[in-house]
Image (tube, rainbow, N blue to C red):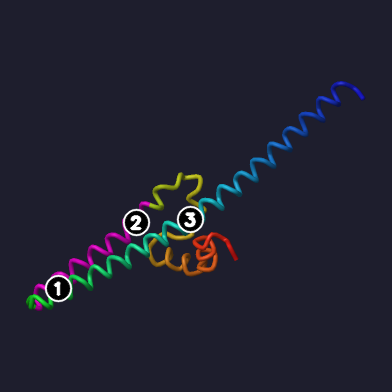
Amino acid sequence: MEWWLQLLLFVFGYVTCSTFYFFRATRASIAILKATQLVSLYILTRSLEHFAFGRETRLHHMRRAEESEHNINAFLRLYNKEVEDYKRRSVQQIIEAHPSFFRQVLEFDDWESAMELLNKNKPEMYAFLRGYDD
């Protein structure tokens, strides 16, 4: 075989290998990115559960201390506003953490769509949290 044909064959093999490696690495990156999105959303929902527990504890103490209904309602308004701000800022932080190249991978843009994504992937999330020991 001619030396230039061998060189062309080598270059073709190298480019093919590099291309397949790039596609495999991109697919792995996207899978990791989606897993981290789900884990971060799960952590956010767990933190909101703890917020709700703190809310109920605070309400219990306010009622035991016989706080006025006005104070209780003011606390509830402030609490609800803080929780809504927390949800909005959290999702915005996740979105902003993605480089522009990976923004098209995002399947949510607000809290409601993020929770839909988490519900849709509930079995995978539980498997991940259990450590895949099925």
Question: Which is nearer the eye, 4 or 121?
Answer: 121
**Amino acid at dot 1:** His
Categorize mark 2 by other alpha carbons within 10 Å: few (<14), some (14-19), many (20+).
Answer: some
User: Residue at label 2?
Assistant: 90
Q: Secondary structure at mark 1?
A: helix
The quarter of the image holding the N terminus is: top right
Residue at image location 24% in from the left, 67% down from the top: 54
User: Residue at label 1?
Assistant: 61
Q: Is residue 21 above or below residue 118?
A: above
Q: Which mark is residue 106?
A: 3
Residue at image location 47% in from the left, 50% down from the top: 103
Residue at image location 87% in from the left, 21% down from the top: 3
Quadrant in the picture for residue 21: top right
Which residue is farthest top? 3
Q: Secondary structure at mark 3?
A: loop
Secondary structure, magenta segment, majority class: helix
Q: Earlier in the sequence, mark 3 or mark 2?
A: 2
Mark 1 in CB contact with mark 3 (< 8 angstroms): no
- Tell me if 24 is positioned left or right of 126 in this view: right
- Tell me if 4 is positioned left or right of 21 in this view: right
- List x then y, in percent, for residue 78: 18, 66
- Is 79 part of what is drawn in magenta? yes
Give the alpha-carbon distance from disc 3 to disc 2, as whole Å: 14 Å
Quadrant in the picture for residue 48: bottom left
Magenta stretch: give its range.
69-93
Which residue is farthest right? 1
Categorize mark 1 by other alpha carbons within 10 Å: few (<14), some (14-19), many (20+).
Answer: few
- Tell me if 111 is positioned left or right of 79 in this view: right
The quarter of the image holding the C terminus is: bottom right
Give the alpha-carbon distance from disc 1 to disc 3, as whole Å: 41 Å
**Amino acid at dot 2:** Ser
- Is 88 part of what is drawn in magenta? yes
